[in-house]
Amino acid sequence: MKLIKEKRWAIVFSLLAMLLWGSAIPLIKTTYIHANIIPDDTGGKILIAGIRFFMAGLLTFIYFGLFNKEEVKKENINIKLTLVLALLQTCLQYMFYYIGLSNTLGSLAAVIQASNAFITVVISVILINEEKFKRKLAALIVGSIGILIINLRGGGGFHFKLSGEGFVLIATTFNALASVLIRKYGRNLNGFLLTGSQFVLGATPLIILGAITHKSNVNFDFVLFLMLSYGAFISATAFTIWTFVLQNHSASEFGIYKLFIPVFGTILSILVLGEALTINIVLGLIFVLAGAIILNKK
C-alpha cells in the first residue's frame, strides 16, 4: 500500500472507504428485513453483526496473503493494541451501532456518524500533539452546522432517542477513539494482520452473545449469505484502507473525511430504502462538504 503514503492517493482511498461505509447503512437495514429479525430482537441484531465481522476478518487475512509484500517481524505485531481494537472498534462499536441503526433512519444515522470527525479531532488533541488545530476547528464547526441542520425536524425540534441516535453516537465515539489509537500506536504494525485479527477477536463474543439471546427465527439462506459477504467485503476493504491511511497520515486531518459518510449514506438510503430527500438534508450536506473543503484549502 505504498500509494497511500502520498497524500493525494490517501485522499482518494479515504473517499473510497467512506463510500463503502456509506453503502453499509442501507445494507444493514435490508439485511435485517431479509433475515427476519424482529425490531425488538437485540440478540438477533448482534448475531448478524458478529457473523459479518468474523467473515470480514477471514477476508482480511486473504488480503494479507494476496497483497502483503513485506516481511512480518515481531515488531510489526502488537497483541495488546489488537485486543483493545477488537473490544472498541469491533465488539462495542458494532454492538451499539447495529442496535442503534435499527431504531433510527438510515439517512439520519449516516449524518450522526459524521460527528466522528469532530470527536477524532478532540481525542487527537488530547492524546497526540496535533498542529493546525484552528483550521481543523473551523472546518468542523462548518461541518457540524450541517449535522445540526439535518437533525432538525418539523417545527424546529430535534429528534433524539438513546436506543437509536444515542447508540449510533456512542458507536461513533468508540470508532473515533480507535482511529486515534491506531495513529498513535500502530504506525509500524502490519495493517492487514491488525485489521483481520481485531475483526475475528471482536466478532467472536458478538456471535456467542447473539446466538444465546436471539429471539427471531433467522432466515439463513443464500441471499443472506450474499448480503453478509458484501458486508464483510465493505468492512475488510474499508478498514484495511483506513488503517493504512491512519498509519501514514494525521488522524485529525483525515478524520474530516468521515464527513463524507453522510453524503454517501444519505444518498444510498434515499435510493435503496426510499427515505425522503428533504431540504434539511440538502443544506446539511452542503455544509458538510464545505467543511472538508476548508480543511484542505491551501
Image (cartoon, helix red, strand yellow):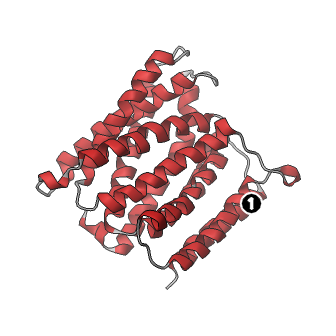
Front residue (pair 166, 154): 166
Please identify the residue farthest to the right as the structure is shown.
155
Front residue (pair 5, 187): 187
The reply to whether residue 257 is visible in this rendering is: no
User: Which image quadrant for residue 111?
Assistant: bottom right
**Going by the image, does 289 lie left or right of 227?**
right
Residue 117: horizontal and vertical position, in percent?
A: 53, 61
Quadrant containing the N terminus in the rendered view: bottom left
Residue 162: horizontal and vertical position, in percent?
A: 67, 39
Question: Residue at 67% across / 48% down in the picture?
Answer: 108
How many residues crowd mark 1 within 10 Å: few (<14), some (14–19), many (20+)?
some
User: Which image quadrant for residue 88?
Assistant: top left
Indicate whether 130 appears above or below 92: below
Residue 33: horizontal and vertical position, in percent?
A: 58, 27
Q: Please, what is the three-letter code of the amino acid marked with disc 1? A: Ile
Residue 137: horizontal and vertical position, in percent?
A: 58, 73
SS for dot 1: helix
Label 1: which residue? 149
**Going by the image, does 136 lie left or right of 148?**
left
The reply to whether residue 274 is visible in this rendering is: yes
How many numbered dots are placed on residues in this image? 1
Indicate whether 263 appears above or below 5: above
Question: Residue at 35% across / 29% down in the picture?
Answer: 204
Question: Residue at 59% across / 49% down in the picture?
Answer: 268
**Going by the image, does 8 lie left or right of 282?**
left
Front residue (pair 2, 30): 2
